[in-house]
Amino acid sequence: MDNLGLFGIFIVGFVGALTPGPDILFVLRTSLCTGARAAFAAFLGIASGWAIFLGTLYFGLSYVLGNAYVQTMLTFAGGVYLIYLAGLLLKNPVSAPTMTQAYSNQTNDGVRILLKTYVKALGINLSNPKAILFFATIIVPFMEVDLAARIVVLFCALSLPFLGVIALGSAIKNYLTPKVFVWIDRICGVIFMCFSVYLLFNAFVSVLGFL
């Protein structure tokens, strides 16, 4: 087995996950505002997106991720979805104590809210062009041999920064005031809006290129 190849793919995955983007921002925001349990639900949503991308590679369907039309459609969908999330964050900034209590609730309401967080995170990942390009153009060259082992190493490398963000956010959360939580949502809303404008612009440019 090519250990250098495994090490290389670990480094690429780790650095790729650390690069600022909607995925890690959503997990960080969830960790800061609502704690580790909700943030882990968000992480599972992101990780499920990775599993779909990696499954596509495993079954030899990397050409699907590399297709320009598919990338354009997902870019457009990602832009629209981030506008929706940005609107929610800007319109209804989180009340940290209330949301934490809701996420900690053992009733059906608590489970439903966790499931909603999971679905939101999955949607962010699947419509994230950064993730699509990462798997389609950067990861594919590393997947020529030992595919199963490399997928496991890559998944671990991607997970570590997110788990670190969850731990850091949960620790810092206890020292933040309610006003800070409101500003966290406002800042995240603005950043998501900027991401969405960038994605929609790129989708528009791609469509013009097809004409």
Image (tube, helix red, strand yellow):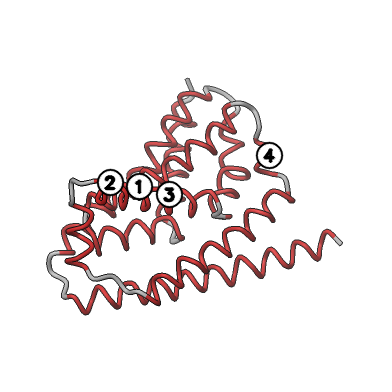
Q: CA distance from mark 3 to mark 1?
A: 6 Å
Q: Is residue 43 above or below residue 62?
A: below
Counting from the top left corner in percent of width and height, residue 130 is at 55, 54
Q: Is residue 186 above or below residue 61?
A: below
Mark 4 Cα-neighbour bin, 10 Å: few <14, some 14–19, many ≥20: some
Q: Which residue is mark 3?
A: 119
Could you say which disc has been placed on residue 68 in the image? none
Q: 87 or 51: nearer the eye?
A: 87
Counting from the top left corner in percent of width and height, residue 138 is at 58, 44
Could you say which disc has been placed on residue 64 in the image? 4
Nearer-N-terminus badge (4/1): 4
Could you say which disc has been placed on residue 115 in the image? 1
Could you say which disc has been placed on residue 111 in the image? 2
- Amino acid type at circle 1 is Leu
Q: CA distance from mark 4 to mark 1?
A: 28 Å
Nearer-N-terminus badge (4/3): 4
Q: CA distance from mark 1 to mark 2?
A: 6 Å
- Amino acid type at circle 2 is Val
Q: Are marks 4 and 3 in contact (CB under 8 Å)?
A: no
Specify the farthest residue to the front.
Answer: 108
- Amino acid type at circle 4 is Val
- Amino acid type at circle 3 is Val
Quarter of the image containing the C terminus? Answer: bottom right
Nearer-N-terminus badge (3/2): 2
Q: CA distance from mark 3 to mark 2?
A: 12 Å
* Residue found 45% across the figure and 66% down from its top: 85
Q: Are marks 1 and 2 in contact (CB under 8 Å)?
A: yes
Give the secondary structure at mark 2.
helix
Mark 2 Cα-neighbour bin, 10 Å: few <14, some 14–19, many ≥20: some
